[in-house]
Amino acid sequence: MATTERVALLEARPELTRFLSSPELDEVARVTLPVVTVDEGALELFDVLRQHRAFGATVLDGFVINSLRIGEQTGIQVLGPGDLLLKGSELMPLWSGDVESRAGDSVRLGLFGTELLAAAFHHPRLIQGLYASVGDQLQRLTAQLVICQLARVDERVLAMLWLLSESWGQVTPSGVRLPLGLTHETLGALVGARRPTVTLALRKLVEDGAIVHQDAGWLLIETPAQPAESAPKILLPELGTVAAGTWTDTQSDQNARDPTETYAELRDTVRRLREQHLTSRQESRDRLNRVRSTRVRMIAVRQQIEKDALKRRSPPSS
């Protein structure tokens, strides 16, 4: 898998230079990365990096899918242009399956090796940019984890499409276009659902006018529901030493307790919770209407800022 093609660092990963000054950007503009092309199929990232003496890579073109199987469920992570590929940890749980990577169609990778390390020696804030990029990618993975916990599959699918559009969406006058040809099975692996359930969820979203199917992807029109302000606060876990027999004693005490709430109290609690739910739902709808009108404009402004920043950082043509 030898390669003679190279790409400028500012073109491959402009995010790595986000913390550099203007003079430093002029110097880093001369840094280039070797490029390799991987055919469709299994991607042995460790072998690719070892062959080219690299410690990581960034996706230039194409998409890579990382998959992990636990029990009967397979989860995947989609990595596309601008994402990082790093060697995985060997400390995976023994009861989990192996992580597998596959390249969709032909994938071009920019390799991180001695060139980037030499540039980071003179400009240490490149490492800060690298850490920030890893953090951005982990934040997207965390969002995917939360999406998989939504109660309804159609909510998961809609939220996942919008999450992917944050990285690879294109703003149009009609909505945000997501040019990804995702099969129903792939969407199911992304949101933790079976393919038939995803098919029904997509049909519902199309009928509700939330999305429109296109030849090369989806047109996203309606944004996911906004989080309610009255959502319960999550308490941080506390770690400590549990004495022998504590669990058994505690369970016995709880089983021996008499109920303290009467039927009337329970009925009042249910009525109060129902009223709070109706109020919160109306507030969420009002917030969604306000956010929906500004969402597309915000994405358009952000993309324009990124384009302007890339033009300013690009070296002058000789």
Image (cartoon, helix red, strand yellow):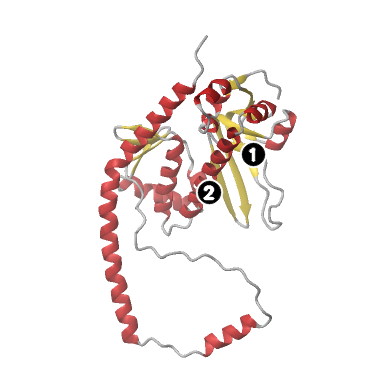
Of marks 2 and 1, which one's residue comes earlier in the chain?
1
Residue at the outermost top position: 318
- Which is nearer the eye, 117 or 289? 117
Quarter the N terminus occupies:
top right
Q: Report helix, strand or loop for mark 2.
A: helix
Where residue 145 appears, as percent x and y from the top left, is 51, 53
Where residue 133 appears, as percent x and y from the top left, is 54, 38
Where residue 192 appears, as percent x and y from the top left, is 51, 53
Numbered label attached to residue 55 = none
As drawn, is 92 to the left or to the right of 142?
right
Where residue 50 appears, as percent x and y from the top left, is 74, 33
Quick one: label 2, few (<14), some, or many (20+) residues within 10 Å? many
Residue at mark 2 to residue at mark 1: CA–CA distance: 22 Å
As drawn, is 106 to the left or to the right of 232?
right
Above or below 198: residue 43: above
Badge 1 amino acid: Leu
Q: Can you tell which quarter of the image residue 36 is in?
A: top right
As drawn, is 264 to the left or to the right of 307?
left
- Which is nearer the eye, 308 or 78? 308
- Which is nearer the eye, 156 or 143? 143
Residue where numbered disc 1 is placed: 86
The residue at 32%/41% (across/down) is 295
Residue where numbered disc 2 is placed: 189
State whether residue 38 appears in this view. Answer: no
